Amino acid sequence: MTTIASESTTRPVPRHYRDTGNRWQTVLLEVFKYAVLIPLTLSFAFPLYWMISSALKVDSQVYTMPPILLPFPVHPENFINGWQILPFTQYAVNSVVFYTVPAVAFTVLSSTIVAYGFSRIRWPGRDTIFWLVVMTMMLPWAVTMVPLFITFKWLGWLDTYRPLVVPALFSHPYIVFLLRQFFMTLPEELSDAARIDGASEFGILFRIILPLTKPALAVVALFRFLWAWNDYLGPLIYLRDENRYPLALGIEQLSRRANDVGNFSNGIPYLMAVSTLVALPIIVTFFFAQRTFIEGISLTGMKG
Amino acid sequence: MAASTEKVSRYTPQEWRNLRLGLLFVSPWALGFLLFTIYPLLSSLYYSLTRYDLLRPPVFLGAKNYLTLFFDDPHFWNVMYNTLFYVGLSVPFGVGAAFIIANMLNSRIVARSFFRSVIYVPSIVPAVASAMVWQFLMNVQYGAVNGVLRYFGLPIIPFLSNPGWAKPSLILVAIWAQGAAVVIFLAALQDVPRSLYEAATVDGANLWHRFRNVTIPLTSPIILFNLIMGLIVAFQEFTVPWLLTEGGPMNSTEFYLIHLYRNAFEYLRMGKASALAWILFLIIVVFSLIIFKSSARWVYYGGEK
């Protein structure tokens, strides 16, 4: 922040502006910029603000016209009551223990090994085969959805998390791609020195490369966490038993209950409260790991 | 290269060792590629030529699934229209909006990272959670938007309950969740060398000229990337329309993946669903190829190529 402030005071005025006396144009442009950006940002933020503020209301505050921007009195007990209408603690355990944690662990481990093979070992045909990885990144998941369902049904894996988690053992093309980008930036001499000392390739990967790419691992782990936590279609296809639902399906279940009029009061506040609680880990992680998120996302587009 | 003079083997022992090691390291991917990409691709091609309800063995039909879809299924063309409408508006407007926002954020600005964060966060919030709040916001009776309109005596907007409004409303939600593209664009814009802008300014280029002749060429590879990725995602949009409108009202938001999902998992028509999947696959390939081909004219790769 300080650098930006000092920049603005010391920045030399471009000759062009001074010569043509164009300062009004610059000022106008500045005003216009904020006149667009501020309302825009507010409207981006509003839905999430509305989610949180509605979570603190009761029915009488929800169905009032005009809508209440700042609820008073607030009803934080909605977060507890809404959570208890359905077994959300069970759903959270399912989301974390059976889906997110294994998916992240499996994907990161397998993709690290694969990315190492595609970047730090020079073998004939490597870059040609890597093109196949890039191609699979662009393959529409809709094409493999039906046959995979048939296969997993045949294996008796329906109503378990195995169809969502076992494929993670075989690496993820997108994450292989990102990790490879990171690994390529490390100097080759690093590996060569270790090889001369008699280190195995696995030794080099785990003792030399990985300690240097911790930020990269954080980026891909974060992405994988996001995909698993937010996944809706996968669980929708494979899980039937409500006790095995992850949070995403739990929210949908709650919304169906809340929409049946007369089922219980404060349906919308409860729904918003639970949605807030499910979005919260993502938002909190974002604010703590903002740099990691932004770097990772930026890298995505690096190679065009 | 000493190896080239040897006639016994094309590779030196060192190269053989590297080949073995390399293949060992990428073997998880190779196995997964065969099991979860190649095999499903081929089997789905086979299923698409059959009638298969998971209960009885598949019955071979030849091209009948495809022919029925194309010539004897008005619903399919409606789904196609909905999907193309959605993709055709959400992708260009989404990428365009993201590019413009990124450009504004890239200029000299206070609290840039704050603006960027606020715009990015909607794209990582669970789609189910954001679908819930949008459904509430866009509700005709007690939604906040219509609440304000009604308060001022303005006509209300039937966002999700009118076939004409439903698609644009869903496109709006999609654009709201475009933050990742903004961040990617912003990173690319920050890589454009300042000196180029300064040189252009000295040469008398105004803001528009600099945008047109410096910014756009130098970020065009990223525009291409975001267009292609946006296309792949938009063609397969499922969660938000499924939760907000379930394909309605009057099938106006029955998008491709919703239709595919229904056929596969509600009607258990695995053959028809596989045919739908292959048609979608080909459509995405064709669209991507068109964009790639055209990119030769408008994408600038600097000195790299």
Image (cartoon, coloured by chain):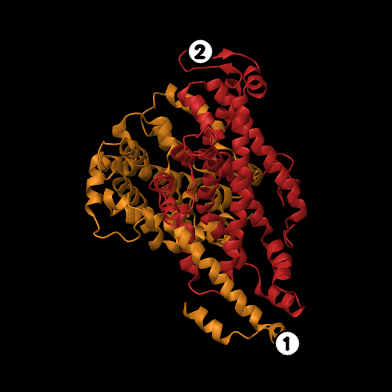
Residue at 26% in and 36% down = A263
Mark 1 neighbour density, 10 Å: few (under 14) some (14–19) many (20 or more): few
Letter of the chain in red: B
Letter of the chain in orange: A
Q: Does the rendering let one see residue A279?
A: yes
| 1 and 2 marks in contact (CB < 8 Å) | no
- Residue A207, given in percent of the width and then of the height, sits at 43, 56
Counting every numbered tag in the picture gives 2
User: Type of residue at label 1?
Assistant: Asp
Task: Check the image and name the residue furthest to the front.
Answer: B153
- Residue A188, given in percent of the width and then of the height, sits at 58, 59
Q: Which residue is mark 2?
A: B57
Mark 2 neighbour density, 10 Å: few (under 14) some (14–19) many (20 or more): few
Q: Does the rendering let one see residue A151?
A: no
Quarter occupied by the C terminus of chain B? bottom right
| Letter of the chain that mark 1 sits on in the rendering | A
* Residue A51 higher or lower than B8, as above or below: below
- Residue B226, given in percent of the width and then of the height, sits at 61, 52
Please, what secondary structure does the residue beneath circle 1 have?
helix
The alpha-carbon separation of the residues under discs 1 and 2 comes to 81 Å
| Letter of the chain that mark 2 sits on in the rendering | B
User: Type of residue at label 2?
Assistant: Pro
* Residue A116 higher or lower than B59, as above or below: below
- Residue B241, given in percent of the width and then of the height, sits at 49, 40
* Residue B72 higher or lower than B20, as above or below: above
Q: Which residue is mark 1?
A: A19
Residue at 66% in and 18% down = B63
Residue at 44% in and 36% down = A234
Specify whether A26 is left or right of A81: right
Please, what secondary structure does the residue beneath circle 2 have?
loop
